[in-house]
Image: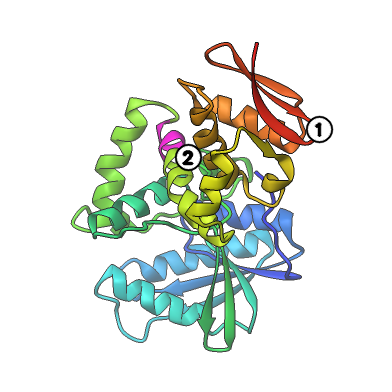
Amino acid sequence: MNKPNIQSKEIYVAFSGGCDSTALLVLSKQWCAEVIAVHFNHGWESSDKIEEHARQVANKLGIKFILGKATTKCPTETQAREARFAFFDTLPHNSTLLLGHNLEEQVETIIFQITRGSKNPTIKQCSTRKSQNGTLNLIRPLLSTPKDQLKQICIDAQVDWLEDPTNNNTDIARNKIRHTIIPVIKGLNANGLEHWIQHFNDSESESEEIFREQLSEQEVSNIVEATSIPCSTLDSLSNTSVAKILKKWLTLQGVQALEDHHIKRCIEVARGARKAWPLPNNLELRRSKQMLAVKQI
């Protein structure tokens, strides 16, 4: 698991005491010398027990522990989240807070947002929010990590975790998704969640990347309608944008039955990592004199 890009000398970890945040706390000790566990007591029936457990785990790992408490019991998940983040917003200006959302939760969140009518469902790995003291930087480094892997991290570190019993309440929409839909996806294929989220991210990020790079549809059309493409045209673009352009261009060049692995290798040709790559229909993408062209084999 790769270390996230953390600029701060110290990092805060949103620590619930559950498996995900416990694994994140263990990993954070490897990533940064100064780690602070941030726990919030929601005022629920089990909250005091969970708080004590979280405190003990932080002590065992030698990590500073700070606590926030709801002034009144949070009656709903939404109010609990609002109260929790209101406490996070009291952290010092420009603090970095790590959140333990995992792969299953990423899928769960996107499904939840879709059912609520969101046109652009997403959970971002890095984001910022205005806080009481200025700005709070949020990082979710575990979004591509399955729950089973996080459990193994805790087991290897010999650290116990304690799940909030409200996570089993399927009257809550997210929990219903977690306990019904997610197992079905995993049951269809061992890597089903990874494949689903990769396909979703690839398709949903395309328009965002193109917009960010300020390529108009006309500019894209000018590129794909040419018989060859200057490599310099693609140098400043992301792989997502290059993939979109190459797929349209190759199709216009008569290449059929293109699959994802073809596009990935063609990107490598465009980037200069390869000189050529074979394509369907006895064709080949070649890079010569800083130009991309399709040639007959």
Residue 90: % across, % down: 54, 85
Instruction: Name the residue tied to disc 2.
Output: 198
Residue 242 x/y as whole percent = 60, 42
Instruction: Tell me the residue at 41%/56% (across/down).
Output: 122
Quadrant, the N terminus: top right
Name the dominant secondary structure of the magenta segment: helix
Residue 32 location, x and y as percent? 74, 61
State the residue in front, 133 or 218: 218
Is 194 within the magenta?
A: yes
- Please report whichever mark, 1 or 2, sits nearer to the chain's N-terminal start: 2
- Residue at the disc numbered 1: 289
Of the residues shown, which amino acid type is indicated by label 1?
Lys
The image's mark for residue 137 is none
Residue 264 located left or right of residue 51: right
Magenta part of the protein: which range? 192-196
Q: Residue at x 51, y 22 (%)?
A: 255
Secondary structure beneath dot 2 equals helix
SS at circle 1: loop
What residue is drawn where x is 67% and y is 55%?
A: 4
Q: Position of residue 97 (x, y in %)?
A: 59, 69
Question: Which quarter shows the C terminus?
Answer: top right
